[in-house]
């Protein structure tokens, strides 16, 4: 009996590494996860990935399936053709690292690599909130702020591995210095880590908040989830933090819509689970800023695929590589 073809989809983020076996329809036949912090350097990362890919291949065999390719999403500026992570602000040891080439020496399958936020958008466009839209922008809110641009149902590659980087649009010219080196990036206003930083900065300035006691006792205990809980309990500082998140997103989205005329925006990532706390501020700000584009034509919605969006985008990327390989073999 013929084995079912599958691909290994991988989503390497600043916080978590996820991987899965995925068939052509996007069905996951196995899914795994571990903390990115457990791989503190290049060697550890390559060794863990190679080992887990081999284990996934064995798992596929036990399911009467056969791995055909690997699709890998990684954070930062990616050069897909060269297989290099050129710059990764949130995982610095990846800077200028030939990740794909290092892995290809350790696995028996073809491997393709792309920016993780691009693959989030690709996945949502395939099976999630962007289904049916040929043009869309995907935004991820988590450790940082990522963006993926889909034009004519394809990832827009840009030049030198840079496109869709909405997280590094300048919102506050004299704002906080971002990990990328710029000041006032959207990421410094709308990501979980920077929202928490902003709150702690305000607590140090004695602004009123129910979080002050926790901050004085253990500053590290305040994270994105604590911030969300505090806002839902009507803590004034936490509510202001999410208003700031929403307004910054609204400004950035209006900028992109004015340039490209997009009509679908999909927002995901763990920090986007606080949707109810920021989406009205975001839409109000976007409507205020859209002066040359009809705001009613723009739909913004939360992602539908949760943590699986990047994995499914990576799977779609891998299946395209399989199809290209089969086409090339047929032409020979």
Image (tube, rainbow, N blue to C red):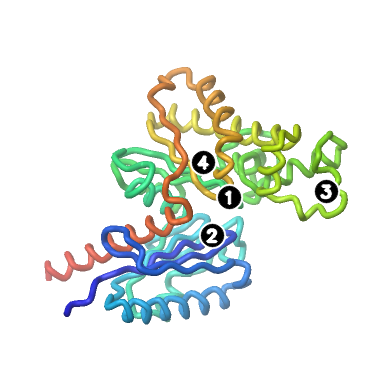
SS class of the residue under badge 2?
loop
Label 3, label 4: how far apart the Cα atoms are = 31 Å
User: Residue placed at 52% from the left, 55% from the top?
Assistant: 76
Label 4, label 1: how far apart the Cα atoms are = 14 Å
Label 1, label 3: how far apart the Cα atoms are = 21 Å
Task: Write down the quadrant of residue 191 in the picture.
Answer: top right
Q: Which residue is mark 3?
A: 215
| Upstream in sequence: badge 1 or badge 3 | 1
| Upstream in sequence: badge 4 or badge 2 | 2
Eye-nearest disc, 2 or 3: 3
Eye-nearest disc, 4 or 1: 1
The answer to whether residue 11 is above or below residue 284 is: below
User: Residue placed at 80% from the left, 43% from the top?
Assistant: 211
The residue nearer to you, when weighing 305 against 152, is 305
User: Residue placed at 44% from the left, 46% from the top?
Assistant: 148
Q: Which residue is mark 2?
A: 13
The answer to whether residue 305 is above or below residue 209 is: below
| Upstream in sequence: badge 3 or badge 4 | 4
């Amino acid at each position: 009996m013929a084995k079912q073809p599958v691909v290994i989809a991988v989503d390497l983020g600043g916080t978590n590494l996820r991987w899965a076996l995925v068939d052509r329809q996007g069905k996951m036949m196995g899914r795994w996860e571990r903390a990115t912090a457990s791989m503190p350097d290049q060697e550890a990362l390559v060794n863990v990935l190679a080992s887990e890919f081999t284990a996934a291949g064995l798992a596929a065999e036990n399911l009467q399936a056969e791995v055909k390719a690997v699709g890998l999403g990684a954070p930062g500026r990616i050069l897909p053709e060269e297989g290099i992570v050129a710059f990764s602000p949130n995982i610095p040891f990846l800077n200028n690292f030939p990740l794909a080439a290092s892995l290809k020496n350790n696995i028996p399958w073809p491997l393709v690599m792309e920016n993780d936020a691009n693959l989030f958008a690709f996945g949502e466009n395939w099976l999630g909130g962007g289904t049916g839209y040929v043009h869309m922008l995907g935004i991820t809110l988590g450790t940082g702020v990522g963006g993926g641009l889909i034009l004519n149902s394809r990832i827009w590659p840009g030049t030198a591995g840079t496109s869709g980087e909405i997280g590094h649009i300048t919102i506050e010219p004299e704002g906080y210095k971002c990990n990328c080196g710029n000041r006032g990036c959207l990421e410094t206003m709308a990501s979980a880590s920077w929202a928490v930083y902003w709150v702690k900065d305000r607590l140090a300035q004695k602004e009123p908040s129910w979080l002050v006691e926790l901050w004085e006792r253990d500053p590290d205990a305040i994270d994105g989830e604590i911030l969300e809980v505090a806002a839902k309990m009507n803590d004034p500082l936490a509510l202001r933090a999410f208003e700031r998140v929403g307004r910054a997103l609204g400004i950035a989205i209006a900028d992109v819509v004015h340039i490209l005329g997009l009509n679908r925006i999909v927002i995901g990532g763990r920090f986007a689970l606080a949707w109810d706390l920021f989406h009205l501020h975001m839409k109000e700000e976007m409507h205020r800023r859209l002066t040359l584009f009809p705001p009613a034509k723009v739909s913004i919605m939360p992602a539908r695929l949760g943590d699986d969006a990047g994995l499914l985008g990576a799977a779609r990327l891998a299946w395209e590589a399989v199809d290209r390989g089969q086409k090339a073999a047929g032409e020979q």
